[in-house]
Image (cartoon, rainbow, N blue to C red):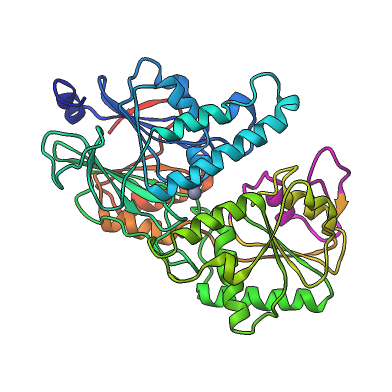
Amino acid sequence: MLAGPGLASWRSILKFINLTRRTEIGANCYYLGSGEQGIVLDCGMHPKDEGEAALPNLAALAGRPIDAILLSHAHLDHIGSLPVLMRQQPQARIFMTEATAAIGDALLHNSVNVMTREREEVGVIYPLFTHRETERATDRWQHCPLGQPFTVNGERSPARPDDELSFEFCGAGHVLGAAGILLRAEGRTVFYTGDVNFDDQTLTKGAVFPESEIDVLIIETTRGDSPLPDGFTRAAEEQGFAEAISRAFARGGCVLVPVFALGKTQEVLAMLYKFKRAKLIEDVPIYIGGLSSKMTEIYDRRANTSPRVLPRLQLFPEVAPFVLNGKTIADSPARPGRIYALSSGMMTPKTLSNIFARRVIDRPEHSIFFVGYADPESPAGILRRAQPNELVSLDEDEPAQPLRCQVEQFQFSAHASRESILDYIKKVGPRKVVLVHGDLPAVEWVRASAATALPTTEVLVPLPGVEIEL
Ligand SMILES: [Zn+2]
Ligand SMILES: [Zn+2]
């Protein structure tokens, strides 16, 4: 309950702790509250770290009761550790959009399978949660539509509550179900963007975010170190991607596109649908992975009810991708004239994209096309930087291979450009802006740019694990 003495402290001292372990895009998780009440925003799992090191710094929550856990979207780096936090905070209510719940359910069960497979390498603590615990956890999730304020007790709240903490989900673009979270209490407003894209993608419409009356803005900075190229348009990038696929087929090879199962897979399928209809590419076979196929079904079922550029497009019936899994990938040679849009996007060892890449990397007729963000230290990041004929190790358990295939990069990020992040901060003009979800150079560019553009705004880069006052 939020009535009583907690209110005064929420108003007077608002505390914030960055629960990620480093300044990076890892296990995203943030604490916000006062001494007596608190909420947690997101609870991710680090995509590269293993075991307990992959969890957020949940120890920093010791002695702080959590009233509610609010989820911005269902990427692993935002929802992957939720069952662990729910075990530690059994009284907390859990809120997210309906689509995020559907995706999160599939993703967490997949994560249990991955952790179970890795158990022997990592040690006795794996998996960090089980299928049963995940089932019990998802039963407790409460779904909230976009654009409606709720109290942390899960009740509808008036638009401008005067004495209760309320929250409202605001469409964030990015991926299906993604939302920024607007928090209001006693006339103070805090807005957490989660991962955001202000522009339309091929399938997903851009964010619809509030632009005024925000005191504290907590904003992602993923693309802070990559300027938008001069004259960039998504339409021109799509055209270039289609032409590159045609060139790859003319060389007699196949195309591997490493993609995240959630979001990028569906955007790529929508692009391939457009390319085929416009006769930019032939009607070639397309392959995706098992988790991607589950996510695609979730997208299809919500085609008419989610903010879509192509609201009637049903990806499965229209694009008809073949589905590969950990077993069938072994019998799937790299065949010319085919597109393999396989996860993971970072080409993590033992995932379909990593296994398949080792099949094509040393063959000059084949191609690997990158279409989004990759951690610079991940196999995808290493491959993107590699020079032709350089020896590349995609999996430390396997021999390194010379890079002989074609590698090209395209910009279809699901994240806002740094220019649009800065524009949004300027439009909002908050009293304080808190920069999260970025590697150090990215955060630093946004910090310096925002500080110059808005001299009266306090720009904060929250040190991991250190409590600050907002
Ligand atoms: Zn995301
Ligand atoms: Zn993220």
Q: Quadrant of residue 158?
A: top left
Q: Is residue 260 visible?
A: no
Residue occupying the far top of the picture: 63
Q: How many marks?
A: 0
Residue 396 painted magenta: yes
Residue occupying the far left of the picture: 162
| Left or right for 464, reference 365 | left
Foreground residue, 364 or 299? Answer: 299
Q: Quadrant of residue 421?
A: bottom left
Q: Is 247 above or below relative to 190? A: below
Which residue is depicted at the point 61% across and 40% down? 110
Q: Is 123 above or below relative to 159? A: above
Quadrant in which the C terminus is drawn: top left
Q: Please, what is the dominant secondary structure of the magenta stretch?
A: loop
Q: Is 37 above or below relative to 207? A: above
Q: Is residue 177 visible?
A: yes
Residue 180 in percent (x, y) is at: 35, 49
| Left or right for 35, reference 348 | left
Residue 414 in percent (x, y) is at: 50, 58
Residue 207 in percent (x, y) is at: 36, 59
Residue 158 painted magenta: no
Which residue is depicted at the point 41% across and 38% down? 461
Foreground residue, 453 or 199? Answer: 199
Residue 56 in percent (x, y) is at: 50, 29
Region rendered in magenta: 373-400
| Left or right for 358, reference 468 | right
Quadrant in which the N terminus is drawn: top left
Foreground residue, 442 or 39? Answer: 39
Foreground residue, 353 or 194? Answer: 353
